[in-house]
Image (tube, rainbow, N blue to C red):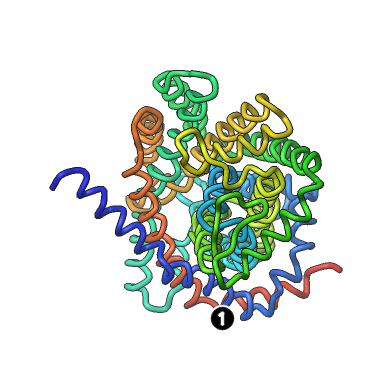
Amino acid sequence: MDMQKFSSIIGAIDDFVWGPAMLMLLVGTGIFLTCRTRFLTWRNLGYAIRSTLSKEARTKSHGTGDVSPFSALTTALAATIGTGNIVGVATAMVSGGPGALVWMWVSAAFGLTSKFSECMLAVKYREVNEKGEMSGGPMYTMKKALKNKTFGVVLGWLFALFAVIASFGIGNMTQGNSISTALHTTFSVPTAVTGAIITVLVLLIVVGGIKAISKVSSVIVPLMAIFYMICGVIVILCNIKNLPAGVSMIFKMAFSLKAVGGGLCGSIVASMMSAMRYGVARGVFSNEAGMGSAAITAAAATTDNPVRQGYINMTGTFWDTIVVCTITGLAIASSGVLGMTDGAGNLIEGSELTIAAFQTVLGAPGGRLVTIGITLFAFSTILGWEYHGEKAWEYLFGTHRYNMIYRVVFSLVAFVGCTQSLKLVWSFSDIANALMAIPNLICMLLLSKEIAADVFEFQKKIPY
């Protein structure tokens, strides 16, 4: 079989696993869990955000764990706030029209409960390994909480296997490729140089384990997110005269049964179905709600109650999609760059579209700011996913003794990602991500009664 045919087969499998059935399962699980918990995750979002920003969240004074509740959240956010927030939003708005942004919000709203549920269960069923460190995540929940033990063990093993594969692909190589491409395009840095630097930096940090990763993440993630948000808000404010028309276009195209375009869309025409498809797909891809990855990091948090940490980790979906993705989307919608074509007549999309939006106000430095944003976002994603993959690796081998092998191999793979063309890797990573989500969603649906009972019990402890 030649490489081209193999690539097309992998592409077809990728399109199938991320088709309507998968997206319905992801959003449908979120809707079901939100209704089953009587919308308490929505009603308690204010409490969750206050808890996240409190001084207490930065300490390890209550309960047991490896890192503070805030560090557990920022390490999880390190893996989710990434190129999806810059490239993914732009891609969704070109492929599905600006209305895709509304469907990103819808997927995030129900994704709050999915993220809450997987993280809460991970803390509840975590274990302490031989080294005295916390080990948890959907694989431990499946093994310990599901009534049919054989089914639980098989499901947990499959989740861990797909998580390891995904960590090398979407969590490592594709991120490294985004960094090296952006730096080469903007600053003419050779890809091999970028690859060597990233490999060394990743190795230096991950050798220290979760404590070193969380220290770096708790500094990089808030700083880079705030910096990017400020720049994005400046772009929106300077294009404020276009904002009402931009917002009107977003909602009009989100719910239009017929394909529409015009206005600030340039040559883009899209209907509600395409807006829904790309908005939900990119939203889930960006915040990873329902994938189970953030739950692995949540299990390391110091907490006295699994539900409390579930609420803190749940805010990751809010910060990622409702805040950061919205700023990218509004910057694009208000800047008039959507639907623009390049010299060859091709639609401008991906990072180039976001760069073009920022350049309308900030000029050439705007493009450099987006490039720096992509670099920091993608680098932090590599760190966050290293921990996810390492814990899945530990679960597969039943011991932490081989973790150092994983750390070294993971760091070296980053170099491959920076220096190779990755269309095939993107498709493999997408498939692994989907296959990782399926066992996690099945597990949450089977444990929905337990999730609801724990939420209702904790409600008595929430101060108003």
Q: Position of residue 305 (x, y in %)?
A: 67, 63
Whether residue 289 is visible, yes or no, is: no
| Residue 165: image location, x then y, percent | 35, 48
**Quadrant in the picture for the C terminus:** bottom right
Question: Relative to 262, is 407 on the left or the right?
Answer: left
Q: Is 304 in front, or is 309?
A: 309
Vertical position of residue 177 compared to residue 75: above or below: above
- In this view, the residue in front, 199 or 215, is 199
Q: Which quadrant of the structure image shows residue 412? A: top left
Q: Residue 149 placed where, x, y %?
A: 36, 74
Image location (x, y in percent) of residue 43: 76, 71
**Which residue type does callout 1 highlight?**
Lys
Q: Using a 10 Å C-alpha cutoff, classify the residue at mark 1 as few (fewer than 14 neighbours), some (14 to 19) or many (20 or more).
A: few
- Given residues 171 and 461, the one toward you in this image is 171
Residue position for label 1:
449
Evaluate whether residue 248 shows in this view.
Answer: yes
The residue drawn where x is 57% and y is 66% is: 114
From the viewer's perspective, tell me whether residue 428 is left or right of residue 182.
Answer: left
Under circle 1, the secondary element is: helix
